[in-house]
Image (cartoon, rainbow, N blue to C red):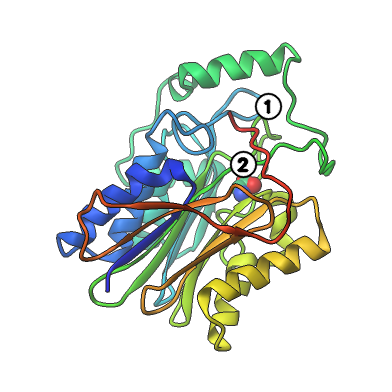
Amino acid sequence: MSSIVATWAFSGPGVVTAAGILANGGGALDAVEHGIHAVELDTRVTSAGYGGLPNALGRLQLDAALMTDDGRIGAVMALEGFRAAVPAARHVLDHSPHSILGGDGAAAFATGHGMVAATDTAQLLSPHAKKRYRQFRNGEISPGPHRDHATMPHTDTVGMIARDADGRLAAGCATSGMQFKAPGRVGDSPIVGAGLYADEAGAAVASGDGDQMLRFCIAFLVVEQMRGGEEVQLACEAAMRRVHAADPKCQAAVTGMSPDGGVGAAATHGGFRVVRWRAGTGAEDVQNEEARAVSETTWKHSCV
Ligand code: GLY
């Protein structure tokens, strides 16, 4: 059965977009790409694409990745000049002999495949992002001391997984990364195994404090447990328990999908929500629900 799950309530319109593609017979990869792209172009979302908060130089610097269950990968990191990164990740997946392109090389590749770069970097910041950047420059808000968990801002990645009518799985994610990050900083989102993973055993996407989460390879961890026979919800919870036991201040969240389209989700802290859709309901009929948390503490959002 076709199925979709995505991180955070803000992904709702993207899930509707993706559901429309699956409902019309489209494939999982197209659904995930276009679903994430819709979120990237939504200016209300301050942690991905246009509307995302910039780096310390005031530049929108984006990461995105796509992966299919048959092992195709496309990712871009530290991409500048565009309002969205997932279309560039798709070009890498379809047209590059490489899996990940970064920085200027990623931008040149995207341009070479028809993506039009902004002529002025200011065009890439929404009015809200410009205001928040002015506040940052005035010292009214800070990116947080690196590695100081107590005050460190985090980012909320759009991650999405789809299973199509042919039973194929695809996973993807996109983020503008930590607000006011050091130029060139890359978190977990475009890293296969960390931010996303998909193969014949299932798929997973992660969200949270990328600098801390990277070492746990969360998406791979969840899929690997499903390969060992664990049910998807229990696999997500086990991964979050492991993160929380090792680093109680790390905010991490994950959602996974089993090969039959079953969905699980869990987080280290309370407040993580996922948006779900299943075939047999209207494309607009998405469910938004809170995931189980493995601690009593609440998620602190800073990309606002
Ligand atoms: N989880 C996304 C990031 O830290 O960039």
Residue 220, quarter of the rendered image: bottom right
Is 78 left, or right, of 185 in this rendering?
A: left
Residue 238, above or below 50: below
Residue at 32% x, 47% y: name it. 113
Residue at 81% x, 44% y: name it. 149
Which quarter of the figure is the C terminus placed in?
Answer: top right
Residue at 44% x, 58% y: name it. 172
Residue 59, above or below 188: above
Where does label 1 land, which residue? 56
Q: Is residue 151 visible?
A: yes
Is 269 left, or right, of 81 in this rendering?
A: right
Instruction: State yes or no: discs 1 and 2 in contact (Cβ < 8 Å).
Output: no
- The kind of residue tagged 1 is Ala
Where does label 2 land, which residue? 155
Residue 81, above or below 95: above
Q: Nearer the viewer, residue 264 or 186?
A: 264
- The kind of residue tagged 2 is Thr
